[in-house]
Each structure stands twice: as structure tokens, then as C-alpha cells.
Amino acid sequence: MLAKVLSGATVGLKSIPVTVEVDLSAQSLPSFTIVGLPDKSVDESKERVRAALKNSGAEFPQHRITVNLAPADLPKEGPAYDLPIALGILLASGQIAADMKNLLVFGELSLDGTLRHTNGILPMALLAKEKGYKAVYLPEVNAKEAAVVAGIRIFPISSLIALFQHLTGSMPIKSFPHIPFSKLQREQMAEFDLADVKGQEQAKRALEISASGGHNLHMKGVPGAGKTMLARALPGVLPDLTESEALEVTKIYSITGNIPEGDSIIRLRPFRAPHHTTSRIGLIGGGAHPMPGEISLAHRGVLFLDEFPEFPRHVLESLRQPIEDGIVTICRAAGTITYPATFVLVAASNPCPCGYWGDPVRRCRCLPGQILQYQKRISGPIMERIDLHIDLPPVQAEKLTNEFKSETSKMVKKRVQKARNIQTRRYKKTRFVCNNDLGTKEIKEMFSVSNECLKLLRQAVTTLHLSARTYYRTIKIARTIADLEGVKDIGPSHIAEALQYRPKLDA
């Protein structure tokens, strides 16, 4: 007898329907075979399903069992096919009679028949909505994650026995209610408040501009100047995630298993701070079975690279294309996968190997050649892709000891949110979210620059030797500064301030 159960496979961030076909034949010796390009974890489903059925009180058929995961040319990974395979065996053996059309089934089984937390639930729920399926059967612990998707019925399954009782009508399971995004929003928290950072007013201003327009930031200064504190305070001034952004981020965290058990959706902008020994695959993504790296886990959030020059050069160079395009494309023999990677890069570095070059009090012990070699670890193309460059001086003693209170993160965030709201209205009918997302063509079409501003930019190109990329990035920064002021057009003062954040020629 043949039974079919609908499930799905995740390729990158996209989900593809998979039909689990189960055939039972009594005219051959008992066996259990899974075909359709299963990996090792899928092939091991045979033992989990066998034990789960027996420990749930069901009969495991002593027939030749053939399971086909169609389409057969798509590689299948992970233990999420346990539940549809077990259900297919129950249907094919006649232990359950149920109409499984337009019902998507997904979940990992324990040996006692209970359902375990399973990765990739949100993409499956979005697939069900896209394909118009009536309902989704999934593990109870994942129900909140799928419930953020409106328009589909979610049935939380605790065990095989509960699913059997539901399908036979003896004990129906209530569908899990939809959870509106507005009920899930939470105030963005940060490790530090900007009020905790003494002095460094120019750096705080750069941080505000970075948060408002999504611009990359490089802070260079002696140890103890406050670089790490400023970077870790940035999440507290970033605007709140929109619903579409939250779903994008949650999809990434869902397939990587980074959503806390029992939680629903990522409500706070990510902050990722990988160590400088991180490999290129760890940062960019990839592997034998390609998975998102740190830059994708930082999507719509912050990627903080402390000790920037200490990262291997080939690792830093791999950031070039993702910074420009907002995506990372991983090519392997089996296929090509694209992950989103739109993040705010915050880099922190010392001016020299010992850290004290330029310090008015502590003496630098590095030779000129060592300083030059240290600074050359970061290539020009990478530096060009960073919009805001700040030199942090040592904090003066009077600023450390006085009781003067600077602006809190909450006060700065109000201005940042207003600027982002302006950008949201401006790019309403486009795919862009903030000013930094725009390319050269869009800058020319959407930003009007006066003759006075153009004159100032021409002078800057000549004297500061700006490249074409830097020229257009300067205009984007000026547009963000104008948005912070609530001004319609870019003015010379905005251009002048934007030019202040270019790296010094001797740096």
C-alpha cells in the first residue's frame, strides 16, 4: 500500500516542498530503505522511526518498506523527516485512515515517540502559507515560532500518540493561535548606555550617524579610549526591527538552530562579535553543507570586529562583496546558495602593535616600519568600504572624574528612529531600507545635490584624492546627516561634516 505525506526541505533560506512517499510490500523480505538523496541524519531516521513507533504502542510492519523523498534530485538533510516518515508508515499499514492532502508535516522524533525541537520551522510555515496548505503539523516546542505567520493553522504535536489520537478524532488538538508581531516587540537592550561613555563626543556623533543610515564605522584609538564600549552601546540606539526585518533575521536563526527553545521570533537587532581567530568560513559561511556565517547572523544588526588588523588578511578581504551587495553567495559543486548579509560593520583597531602611537603620555615602543606594516594589514579596498572613520584620543582625567551626564542611548535613539522613519517613507516603493543600501544609480536618481555642494565635493576629490566609491558614499552620509536634522535637501554643511569622517592621509 502507498501513502503520501507532504513535508519540505530548506535550501539556503528558501523552502521547497518535499513529498514523502511510503510503500509497503508484503511480497519481499522485511527491510527499510530511504531513497531520494538522503544524508546520514536522514538515513538514521530508520532507527528513530522504528523505535518511536514501537514505544508509542503502534505496530512496525514486517514488510519491505521503501521511502522516497521527492524530488529525488534534491539533497535532503536533517532529522525533520522523522515525523512524516512515521506518519506515512502508519497510513500505508492501515493503522490510521486520514486525508493528508494540503497538510505539511515536519519534526524530529525521540525514541519514545515525543517530538523534539527542530530547526527550520519558520521557513516551513512560510512555505505552507505560500503554497496555500491548510495546516502545519510540527513539534509543540516550535509552535510559537510558526505562529508568527498569519493565515495558516498550526497544530502543535507533542508525540506520535497525540498525533494518532488527533487524526482518529479521539482527542483533537487545538490549533495554536496566531501571535501578532506587535505583541512580540521588545525594547532594544545594549550592554552599555552611551551615558556610561565619558567624553568621546565626536565618536558618539559618528555612532548616531552610523545607526541612522546603516553606515559602516571604523574606530581607531589607544587602549582604554572606549572603542569597545561604544561598539557595544550601538544596539541601544539602533531603530526597532520592522516585522519584515524580524522575519528575515528569524529565518536565518531558525535554520541554524539559534532561536531559544520555546521562543517565537528574533525581536532585537543582532549583535555579533566574532574573535579575530575566526576562519573565513566561520565569518562568511559555507562548509560541506553550507550554513550562514557571522555576517549573515548579523543581518539587519551589527557585526563588531575588535582588533581589526589582527584578523587574517584573506578573511577581511572576503568581506568586500558582502559589504557592497548586502548578500553572500556560496558556490559549491552541489549548487549555489545565497544568504542575506546586510549589516553595520563596526571595526576597532589600535594605531600600532603596542597601541600607544600618538598617545601624549605613554610612549610608543614600535619602530616606524612595524607601525607601517601593522596598518597595511587592512587593505585600501576594505577601508574604502567603511564610511565613517574616527580617531579616539585618550579620555582626559577631568572627564573621567566629573559628574557631567551625557545623553543617554534612549535620547539618541529617538533621533535615530525619526531619521529612519524619513528613510522608510522615502524608500517605501523600493527594496531599500536605509541610505546605505543605495547604489550609485539610485543615488543619482533619488538625491538632489546643489551646485554649492558639488563645488565642495569637487574640491574634496582633488585635495583628499577621493575615489568614485568614496565620492558616492560621502553623499550617502550627507543625506543621513540631513535626515537627522529633518532637512529635505543636502546642504554644504552636511557635505562638510561627512568629509570629516574620511581617514587621514597619513593613517
Image: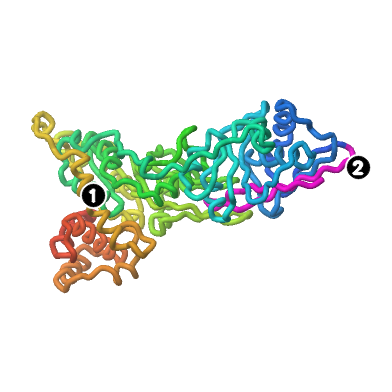
Q: Quadrant of residue 488?
A: bottom left
Report the number of numbered marks.
2
Q: CA distance from mark 1 to mark 2?
A: 71 Å
Q: Earlier in the sequence, mark 1 or mark 2?
A: 2
Q: Does the image show residue 9?
A: yes
- Residue 136's tag is none
Question: Residue, x 17% and y 37% (percent of image)?
Answer: 394
Instruction: Give the vertical position of 221 relative to 462 (above or below).
Output: above
Q: Position of residue 431 (x, y in %)?
A: 39, 61
Looking at the image, residue 8 sits to the left or right of residue 51; the answer is: left
**CB under 8 Å between discs 1 and 2:** no
Question: Residue, x 79% and y 32% (percent of image)?
Answer: 60
Q: Position of residue 255 (x, y in %)?
A: 53, 43
Q: Residue furthest right?
A: 27
- Residue 416's tag is 1
Range drawn in magenta: 1-29
Instruction: Give the vertical position of 427 relative to 208 (above or below).
Output: below
Which three-letter amino acid code belongs to the residue tagged 2?
Gln
Q: Position of residue 57 (x, y in %)?
A: 73, 27
Question: Residue, x 79% and y 47% (percent of image)?
Answer: 2
Q: Residue furthest front?
A: 170
Determine whether the residue tagged by mark 1 lies in a helix, strand or loop: helix
From the viewer's side, name the closer residue of 203 and 486.
Answer: 486
> Which residue has dot 2 on it?
27
From the viewer's side, name the closer residue of 51 and 352.
Answer: 51
Determine whether the residue tagged by mark 2 lies in a helix, strand or loop: loop
Q: Residues within 10 Å of mark 2 (few under 14, many from 20)?
A: few
Which three-letter amino acid code belongs to the residue tagged 1?
Val
Question: Residue, x 17% and y 58% (percent of image)?
Answer: 486
